[in-house]
Image (cartoon, rainbow, N blue to C red):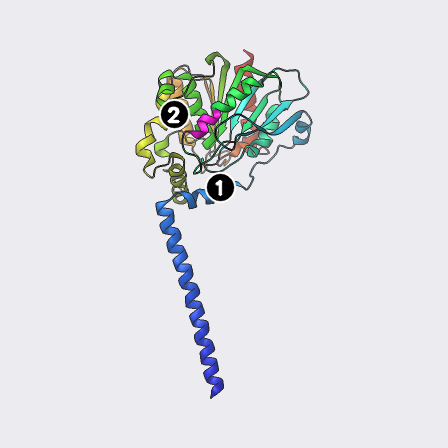
Amino acid sequence: MSFVKGTSSASKRKRKLLWTALGSIAIFLAVSVVFTLISPLPSSMAIRIAFNKKMAVAPDNFDEMKNRVQVIRNLSYPSKHKDNAADIYVPTDKAGPFPVVLWVHGGAFVGGDKEDIEIYATALASEGIAVVCMNYRRAPEAKYPTPIIQTNDAYLWIRDISYEYSFDIGRFIIAGDSAGAHIAAQFAAIQSNPSYADEMGFSQDVPLHTLKAALLFCGPFDVAKMDEGNNLAMNFLLGRAAWAYFGKKDWSKHFLSQATISNHITNDFPPTFITDGNNLSFEKHGMELAEALKIKDVTVESYFIPVDTETASHEYQFIMNTPAGKEAFDKTVDFIRQCTES
């Protein structure tokens, strides 16, 4: 009889522990859902963690490329904002001064790092093009337009150290991928549109005749459509990332006009190379921006991969051992040379 009672008591304790555990999980999930609804922080951190996984793939001849490039890592450019570090990639087998690319990394405004560009920057430098990859303070720790301010800070620093690293500041190129492409495009619009610079509270520090090109990869250029893709989960995360970046849950009501690139293009916008993948990316944004630039008589070269030839997803250009990745790189190098050697 006592054995039965003991067994019954043990079963009750197990059931109690199980229900306690399930209740704790339910409370945790409920709190997480509520927190996600009232703050962009959980989603932003999830995106940031996802971007810690490096996706770039080197081309087959990458070892040969590296032998022609010197890399100087983790220098600091002057800025009142944190995360003001940069890496410099300089050709070693050619005589400078070199055209210089300032590259703004992607990461949905909340993630990513300058090291994500290491393979691509090395490949460009092996072709005789200096590259500076910058970090910037990401959301939600910093709000819009902090990354654009830091892009300007990085440009001024590049100008000041141009002699030391054989940069030809008279052949300056702004570049970016994903969210970094939006930042880079907005920076180019500020430099080429005086009224927009005034609206944004920026000075125009880059002489227009020196801003030779913009290289824009896989960017969300139309803010109104940033979270209107075919993937509901991605739309949710992008909406939360935008909330973190712009600092308002109803961000589209406040920044729709100002942060949509096509609204601020003039015919002084620099010659532009635009590309995007055809799967889970912002291809329509790139196509529409290319058309808007052409209407303003801006020189544009675009590369959009036909769906029936190859599937190319977001940031496909960094997968440099694929046909599309190789083609994008070759077109990028050719475009830089056209813009800087004429």
| Res 131 visible | yes
Magenta segment boundaries in residue numbering: 145-151
Q: Which residue is nearer to you in this view: 98 or 156?
A: 156
The residue under the point 42% across, 66% down is 20
Q: How crowded is mark 2: few (under 14 residues within 10 Å), some or many (20 or more)?
A: many
The answer to whether 333 is drawn above or below residue 54 in the figure is above
Disc 1 residue crowd, few under 14, some 14–19, many 20+, Cα 10 Å: many
Closer-to-camera residue (244/309): 244
Quarter of the rendering occupied by the C terminus: top right
Residue 290 position within the rendered picture, expressed as x and y whole percent measured from the top left: 41, 23
- Nearer-N-terminus badge (2/1): 1
Q: Does the magenta stretch include residue 146?
A: yes
* Residue 264, picture quadrant: top left
Percent coordinates x, y for residue 158 in the rendering:
55, 20
Whether residue 229 is visible, yes or no, is: no
Q: Which of 1 and 98 is in front in this view?
A: 1
Q: In which quarter of the image is residue 108?
A: top left
From the image, give the main secondary structure of the stretch colored magenta: helix
Looking at the image, the residue that sits furthest to the front is 80
Residue 266 rendering spot, x and y as whole percentages: 38, 17
What's the CA distance linking mark 2 and mark 1? 25 Å
Find numbered disc 2 in the image and state the secondary structure of the residue it sits on. Answer: helix
Q: Does the magenta stretch include residue 287?
A: no
Q: Which residue has dot 2 on it?
A: 261
Q: Which residue is drawn at 32% across and 27% down?
A: 257
Query: What residue does disc 1 label?
Result: 48
